[in-house]
Structures are given as structure tokens and as C-alpha cells.
Image: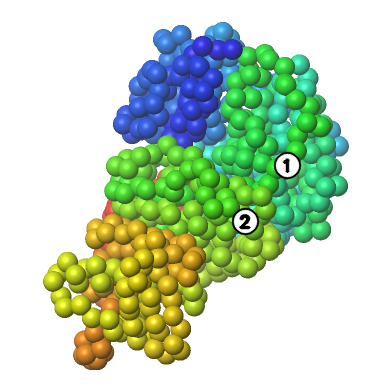
Amino acid sequence: MFSKILIANRGEIAVRVIKTCRRMGIKTVVVYSEADADSLAVEMADEVVFIGPAPASESYLVQDKIIAACLQTGAQAVHPGFGFLSENASFAQRCADEGIVFIGPNPGAISAMGDKIESKKFAEKAGVSCVPGHIGEIDDTAHAVKISEEIGYPVMIKASAGGGGKGIRVAHNRRDVEEGFPAVKSEAKSSFGDDRIFIEKFITSPRHIEIQVLGDKHGNVVHLFERECSIQRRNQMVIEEAPSPLLDEATRAAMGAQAVALAKAVNYDSAGTVEFVAGQDKSFYFLEMNTRLQVEHPVTELITGLDLVEQMLRSAAGEMMAFRQDDLKINGWAIESRIYAEDPYRKFLPSIGRLVRYDPPVEGQHEGYTVRNDAGVREGDEISMYYDPMISKLCTWAPTRLAAVDGMARALEDFHIEGLGQNIPFLAAVMDQERFRTGALATSYIVDEFPDGFDGTTPTAFQIDVLTAAGVAMHRVMSARAGSPARNDWMVFVGHASRAVAVADTGEGLTLTLADDGRVMSLTDVVWRPGKAQFRGRLDGKAFTVNVAPAAEGFVIRHRAAKQKVLVLSPRSAELHGKIPEKKPADTSKMIISPMPGLVVSMDVEVGQTVREGEVVCVIEAMKMQNIIRAEREGVVKVISAKGGDSVAADEVLVEFG
């Protein structure tokens, strides 16, 4: 086994590899860019090597710098993580040429399956059923349009070297191809250093199911069952689970056998993933193979008990696999939610900034479920615009799927982040949806269920009770601190609705009697003090956590995806409060406002131009993704406040109409 390895990656996956190496007694070297100088991975590593500026094209993607760092530190092997150079056959070969072990598959397997175009050709020759499409490189936009119209819309435009949801667009018509093809090429070039593109038929309402495979250098290959990754947004996986609620034993065995056969055909000798697109009828087609460790590998680890990073290390060191297919069993159910730095209330646009507060749920055993949180950040760290916006991967395991879903919902309640936008409320909303809970998934799930975007959810009856109880309890504490006279009768406003509540202190908590129906609620096990951003307790025995923030009056309280202003007043104050007129928001209808911080790639209008609804105004790049900003109504451009190459902040005015 190796005594020292280098990790050619950053963030969460670098931390993940370090943890396994520590357990195995292997020293680690981490390379880092300017943006990652103070990162958790740099703090945890035994040695570090600086490799250049923040852009990946000048640091993490520069092979010479990675090789030099290995030689400088005496690292015997290099783990590429995922993304960056993880599926680059030339890098794997360079490592071999320098006497450095590449902790991943051999260069031949990467060449055969890692390249999306070549993998399609190989799979066809091997008799594997593939999604219909154009298997070959595409010259330019005109060529892309021609191919798309021959295949028939909708089509998927994909980067050959792509992965992690980057470099993918679905085109429903000619205009989508004309806009999407150059955008995908640009993303592919900046993210992977390879701008080759291919196009295939987009299958409507499919499910994304992938098989985890594992091989060694002695010809042994097994599969570690499947993961369902159908909850996606912009082709980026958001929620994954293992196993899949779709598959039966026969389909699972068939998919696993096909994945193993494909891996054996290319002498695969590490961890990898064979991806399939599946129909609701359990039919399936080979999509591609990712010749690397996947972001969502923790759910497979949770149901199999295996450490995939350890298995990669052992395979790379030449060890024979210590188990066979018959030794592997599925134990329970696991779900992963990707916590992203993005604002779900602003159409999920990237959000960058500092983690002013970062308070994840406690890992380990809870009431009926287990929590695991893979992260590469700490409180105070900054999420920059240069890399993927993922903050952490929150996982739960339980004996059954519904118990894992309920556990994830509770874990999301306990996760608190401040300082930037994050998608925790959205993830919580999905966990509460009946469609998700029944396992009726599809890659179109988010578009189907949130066609107008995400704006939170309407509180359920239980959530209104929770918000009421938390608001009353906090108000009592704040009133006592202010020296206000004690009282037991209150009017509680949750949003615009009000209810009269009588409160009594039992010594172990509070009882709240609702005047409208006489119902009595018991609030116990309260954990909160002024200034804390989370309130924990049990309402009628059921544990809950809410996020709280002080408002001009009262509190803003969020339970999962339901957020409301909660105001607790005396009956007389409530009567007077109802007479105060509401303040109207400012009119921004004649402005184009930057929905995110980022870099203006292009400004596509000029002063005096008449812009029609839906027309492209500008393109902003953030988190390696290009975002097309369109006019929401027709107007004449009066003022332009930014140009191509400018950095802009969220809410900055870009264009004003006359």
C-alpha cells in the first residue's frame, strides 16, 4: 500500500479522500489554487503545494503542475477526485510515464469509456443498446442544427468530456440549438479543456439510473447495485438515492450484469459508473460511463458498508478484491441531498459569498435514521465564483425508504446556513411532496412540480402550529428580558392569519390553548436563546427545528420550505396593528437586474434598441455556468450599466428601459 498520495482536487472530495487516507495510515498532499489557500482540505493535508491562480484552467487542469507537485513531494500516487483531470486519459498516461500511480482506471479504459463520443461507438460495437443520436464530432452551429433536425427535437447537446451536469443543454427547437451549442462548447472548454460536442435524442420523462462498478487489476469486476439520480435541475443532480424505487430484482440483475460486462470488456480496474436512461416500464438504455468516483458515491457506501475510496486505493496498489458479487447485499436505504450555494427563490441562480454561519446537523445515529455530511467547508469559508457551487452532501440512511426520507427532512431542518443563498428549503419541499415519497420520479420532476420556479410552500396545519408555538415561546423570553409585564393571552399572526392563544407554563414547557377550537398543544424540550438562529423543541411529542431571524416586528420563521413572518401581540396591540397600511415594494419593472454575482460574458443590446419579450439582453457567467438573461417585457433600452468583461453583484441594475 502507498505511504503518500497526492490529491489533485479541491473542496469536499479532497477532504473525503483525506479522511480515508488517515484511517489507512497514508499521508496526503493537497494542491491548491489562490482561491483555496485557506480551505479545509489545505488545513487537513499533511503537505500542500501551491499551483497557481483561481481559474481551473490555470491551476487544477494544468497537468505539468500536478506532475511536478507529485515529484516534488515524493507522492507515489495521485487521486484525481471527480471533475478536473479525473477522466483525462492523457493525464493518467503521463502519471504512468513518470512512475506515478493513477488512482483510477487504466488509460485504455478511460479512452474507451471516459470519452462520451468514443464510449457510444464502443458500446454499439459491443451490442449494447444506446440512446439514438449522432455519434461523432460536430463542426459548428449550422452542423449542430442540421443534425438536431435529422434526429428530431427534443435533443440533448452534450460535451464529450463532460460530467457533473456541466456542458449539457436540452434543445426543443432550432433557436435552442443556435443558443445552446456555443454555450455548451464554451462551458466544455472552460471546465474540461475539451470543447468537442455530440448530440443525442432526449427521451421524454426518463429516469436516470446508474450502476456502480468496481474492478481490480486481476480481472475481477463486481457491481455495487444502483443509484437513482432522477431529481435533476439543468442536468445537475440534486437528490440521489440507493437503491432505486423503480427497479425489481430482475431488472436490477440485468442492469448490473450489463454494466459488469461492459467494464470487463475494457479491462476496468477501479471504481466507475455505468449510466442508463430508464423508462417507467423498466426498459433501459446505455447512456455513458463515468470512469471515476461519482459525487453521489456516499449512498452506495451507506447501503453496502464499503468505502469506495479505500477500494480505489487498494485496486491501484495492485491488491485483489476481497469479495465477490455474491458477498454483496443491499442493506436499507440511503438518500443524498446536494446542498448548493444557489438561491431557489431566484430561479436557483448561483450565490457566492462567505459562510457567515455554517451549522450542519450532527452526524451519526438519530431517532430512526443515520446522518452523514460530506463537506469541504467550515464556518467563515468563502464560496467563490470559480468552482462548483456545492457546499456539502447531506446523506441519511434508514432501514426503509420512507424512514430515510423522513430522516432527510429532519436533517434538513437541522442544517443552518447564513451569508449566501442555499437550496435547503427547496430540498425540504421535495422531501414533503407525496410524489417524491411514493417514488414516482423522472428527470423532469423539478420542471413538472415547480413549473413557475420555487417560492416556498404554504404552511400545513402542523407547520402553522409549529410557527405559532415557536413565536410565542421566543416572544415570552424577549418580553421577560425587556422587563415587560407577564401576560398569558396573545394574538399570534402567522403571515396574514391571526389566532388567539392562551399560554401557561407547566415547568417542563408550555401549553398553548387555541381559542378558535379549544385545542391544547404541548411545547417541550425547547432549545433557544436570544441571538440563536435555530429554535428546537417538541410539539405534542414531535421533534422539530425552525430557522428564526428577527424582523422589524416579530420574527421570520421557516420550517422546512414554509416561511412566514410571525408576530405576537396583546389583543389591544393587535387591534391597532390591523390599521397600519402595508408598504408597497419599489417598481423595478423597467429594469434588468443581475440575479446573481458573476462576470458579464456579453451585453447583447445597445442604447436606443427596441427589445422584445424573451429576447437575449446579456449573458452572465457564474460557477462555470453561462446564464442567459432575457427581457421579461418589450421596451426601448435607455441606459446600459455594464459591458462584457465587467464583474457585477447580485441585484445590480444592468439595463434600464425608457
First in sequence: mark 2 or mark 1? 1
Residue, disc 1? 330
- The answer to which image quadrant residue 446 occupies is bottom right
Q: Residue at x 29, y 77 (%)?
A: 567
- The answer to which image quadrant residue 324 occupies is top right
- The answer to which image quadrant residue 388 occupies is top left
Q: Amino acid at mark 1?
A: Ile
Q: Residue at x 37, y 32 (%)?
A: 40
Residue, disc 2? 403
Q: For the N terminus, which image quadrant? A: top right
Q: Is residue 292 visible?
A: no
Q: For the C terminus, which image quadrant? A: bottom left
State the residue lying farthest toward the left: 483
Q: Vertically, is 3 above or below 631?
A: above
Give how far across and how far down residue 184 sits, in percent. 54, 46
Q: Label 2 crowding class (10 Å Cα cut-off): few <14, some 14-19, many 20+?
A: some
Local secondary structure at mark 2: helix
Local secondary structure at mark 1: loop
Q: Amino acid at mark 2?
A: Ala
Give how far across and how far down residue 7 sits, in percent. 48, 23
Q: Vertically, is 103 above or below 600?
A: above
Left or right: where 298 falls relative to 284: left
